[in-house]
């Protein structure tokens, strides 16, 4: 029986779902880490306190993980983030990404 052309997509979706479930349970640890290390610039709830720091609330989890990994590895550069990210573990990165991705934000169009 030939495999469905959707089989690779189904496998990818399953992988993404299992990754999301694995990291989502660590949002509480990410919140604690963020309170101690990230809140000064990115705000207690991921809403930036400084014009040069982006809002992180509601950002896509995989994007946040990639960004932090890139800062840590030196593939992406920012004076503050290079220093802050160098000591983050893989678990710290996953936890932080889960925390910020779990924050729900709403957007309203301009009147």
Image (tube, rainbow, N blue to C red):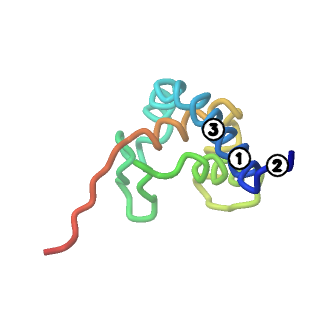
In the rendered image, the residue lying farthest to the front is 1
Residue 104 picture location, percent across and down: 34, 44
Dividing the image into 4 quarters, which one contains the N terminus? top right
What's the CA distance linking mark 2 and mark 1?
A: 15 Å
Residue wearing tag 1: 12
Q: Is residue 42 left or right of residue 11?
A: left
Image vertical order of residue 95 relative to residue 106, above or below? above
On residue 32, the disc is: none
Instruction: Give how far across and how far down residue 94 sits, in percent.
Output: 62, 36
Q: Residues within 10 Å of mark 2 (few under 14, many from 20)?
A: few
Q: Rate crowding at label 3 as few (under 14), some (14 to 19) or many (20 or more) other CA atoms within 10 Å.
A: many
* The label number, if any, that marks residue 3 in the structure image: 2
| Mark 2 element type | loop
Viewer-closest of 32 and 94: 94
Secondary element at image label 1? helix
Query: Which residue is situated farthest in the right direction here?
Result: 1
Query: Element type at marker 3?
Result: helix
| Distance CA(mark 3)–CA(mark 1) | 22 Å
- Name the residue: 49% across, 29% down: 27
Horizontally, residue 50 falls left or right of residue 96, namely left
Above or below, 28 relative to 60? above
Question: Within 10 angstroms of label 1, few (less than 14), some, or many (20 or more) residues?
Answer: few
Q: Which mark is residue 93?
A: 3
Image height check: is 10 above or below 33? below
Residue located 46% across and 25% down the image? 28
Mark 2 touches mark 1? (CB < 8 Å): no
Chain-order first, disc 2 or disc 3 = 2
């Amino acid at each position: 029986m030939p495999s469905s052309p959707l089989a690779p997509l189904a496998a990818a979706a399953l992988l993404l779902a299992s990754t999301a479930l694995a990291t989502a349970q660590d949002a509480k640890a990410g919140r604690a880490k963020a309170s101690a290390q990230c809140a000064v610039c990115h705000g207690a709830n991921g809403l930036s306190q400084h014009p040069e720091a982006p809002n992180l609330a509601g950002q896509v989890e995989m994007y946040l993980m990639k960004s932090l990994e890139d800062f840590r590895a030196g593939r992406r550069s920012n004076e503050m983030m290079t220093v802050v990210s160098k000591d983050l573990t893989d678990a710290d990165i996953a936890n932080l990404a889960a925390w910020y991705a779990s924050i729900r934000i709403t957007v309203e169009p301009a009147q």
